[in-house]
Image (cartoon, helix red, strand yellow):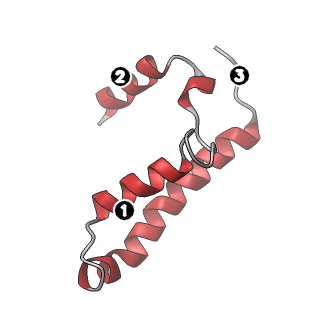
Amino acid sequence: MSQLSSSEINIALLSLGGLVLGLGLLSGFLKKRLFLSDPIVALLLGVLLGPSVLKLIDLAYWGKPETILEQGARLA
Protein backbone atom coordinates (compact mmCIF):
# COMPACT_ATOMS: atom_id res chain seq x y z
CA MET A 1 0.00 0.00 0.00
CA SER A 2 1.44 3.35 -0.98
CA GLN A 3 1.64 6.32 1.33
CA LEU A 4 -0.67 9.21 0.62
CA SER A 5 0.83 12.65 0.34
CA SER A 6 -0.77 15.53 2.19
CA SER A 7 -2.03 17.08 -1.05
CA GLU A 8 -3.98 13.91 -1.98
CA ILE A 9 -5.59 13.75 1.44
CA ASN A 10 -6.45 17.44 1.22
CA ILE A 11 -8.09 16.94 -2.19
CA ALA A 12 -10.19 14.06 -0.86
CA LEU A 13 -11.28 15.96 2.25
CA LEU A 14 -11.97 19.13 0.29
CA SER A 15 -14.05 17.20 -2.22
CA LEU A 16 -16.09 15.52 0.49
CA GLY A 17 -16.60 18.73 2.45
CA GLY A 18 -17.49 20.66 -0.68
CA LEU A 19 -19.97 17.99 -1.69
CA VAL A 20 -21.71 18.13 1.69
CA LEU A 21 -21.79 21.94 1.79
CA GLY A 22 -22.84 22.26 -1.84
CA LEU A 23 -25.69 19.78 -1.48
CA GLY A 24 -26.80 21.49 1.71
CA LEU A 25 -26.90 24.90 0.09
CA LEU A 26 -28.51 23.79 -3.16
CA SER A 27 -30.90 21.10 -1.93
CA GLY A 28 -33.95 23.37 -1.86
CA PHE A 29 -33.29 24.67 -5.37
CA LEU A 30 -32.64 21.17 -6.73
CA LYS A 31 -35.87 19.79 -5.29
CA LYS A 32 -38.17 22.68 -6.20
CA ARG A 33 -36.87 23.82 -9.57
CA LEU A 34 -35.07 20.91 -11.18
CA PHE A 35 -36.92 18.03 -9.49
CA LEU A 36 -33.62 16.29 -8.70
CA SER A 37 -33.05 14.47 -5.45
CA ASP A 38 -29.90 14.87 -3.37
CA PRO A 39 -28.69 11.28 -3.89
CA ILE A 40 -28.82 11.68 -7.68
CA VAL A 41 -26.76 14.87 -7.52
CA ALA A 42 -24.29 13.25 -5.10
CA LEU A 43 -23.92 10.30 -7.46
CA LEU A 44 -23.27 12.57 -10.43
CA LEU A 45 -20.67 14.58 -8.50
CA GLY A 46 -19.02 11.36 -7.33
CA VAL A 47 -18.73 10.15 -10.91
CA LEU A 48 -17.26 13.49 -11.96
CA LEU A 49 -14.65 13.45 -9.16
CA GLY A 50 -13.85 9.76 -9.65
CA PRO A 51 -11.18 8.10 -11.76
CA SER A 52 -13.22 7.96 -14.96
CA VAL A 53 -13.70 11.73 -15.49
CA LEU A 54 -11.62 14.22 -13.46
CA LYS A 55 -9.39 11.65 -11.71
CA LEU A 56 -9.31 13.58 -8.42
CA ILE A 57 -10.23 10.61 -6.22
CA ASP A 58 -8.92 7.14 -7.11
CA LEU A 59 -9.30 4.35 -4.53
CA ALA A 60 -6.98 2.04 -6.45
CA TYR A 61 -4.08 4.40 -5.74
CA TRP A 62 -4.79 4.33 -1.98
CA GLY A 63 -4.80 0.54 -1.65
CA LYS A 64 -7.08 -2.35 -2.48
CA PRO A 65 -10.47 -0.82 -3.36
CA GLU A 66 -12.36 -3.82 -1.99
CA THR A 67 -10.76 -3.44 1.45
CA ILE A 68 -11.38 0.31 1.53
CA LEU A 69 -15.04 -0.12 0.60
CA GLU A 70 -15.52 -2.91 3.18
CA GLN A 71 -14.08 -0.72 5.93
CA GLY A 72 -16.27 2.19 4.82
CA ALA A 73 -19.36 -0.03 4.91
CA ARG A 74 -18.54 -1.11 8.48
CA LEU A 75 -18.39 2.51 9.61
CA ALA A 76 -21.76 3.41 8.07
Between 60 and 70, the one nearer to me in the picture: 60
Give the residue at x 43% y 17%. Answer: 67
- Report the side of 45 relative to 53 (left or right): left
Residue closest to the far front = 52
Q: Find residue 2 and report its image quarter.
A: top right
Q: Residues within 10 Å of mark 3 (few under 14, many from 20)?
A: few
Foreground: disc 2 or disc 1: 1
What residue is pinned by disc 1?
41
Mark 3 vs 1, N-terminal side: 3
Mark 2 vs 3, N-terminal side: 3
Give the residue at x 57% y 47%. Answer: 53
Give the residue at x 34% y 83%. Answer: 29
Q: What is the distance, in whole Å, between disc 2 and disc 1 at their CAs?
A: 24 Å
Q: Quadrant of the N terminus?
A: top right
What residue is pinned by disc 3?
3
What residue is pinned by disc 2?
70
Q: What is the distance, in whole Å, between disc 2 and disc 3 at their CAs?
A: 20 Å
Task: Locate residue 64, reporting x and y percent.
Answer: 51, 16
- Report the side of 40 relative to 14 (left or right): left
Seen in the picture, residue 33 relative to 44 is either above or below; the reply is: below
Q: Residues within 10 Å of mark 2 (few under 14, many from 20)?
A: few
Task: Locate residue 22, reporting x and y percent.
Answer: 47, 69
Query: In terms of secondary structure, where does tag 1 sit?
Result: helix
Mark 2 vs 1, N-terminal side: 1
Q: What is the distance, in whole Å, between disc 3 and disc 1 at their CAs?
A: 31 Å
Question: What amino acid is found at the position of numbered circle 1 in the picture?
Answer: Val
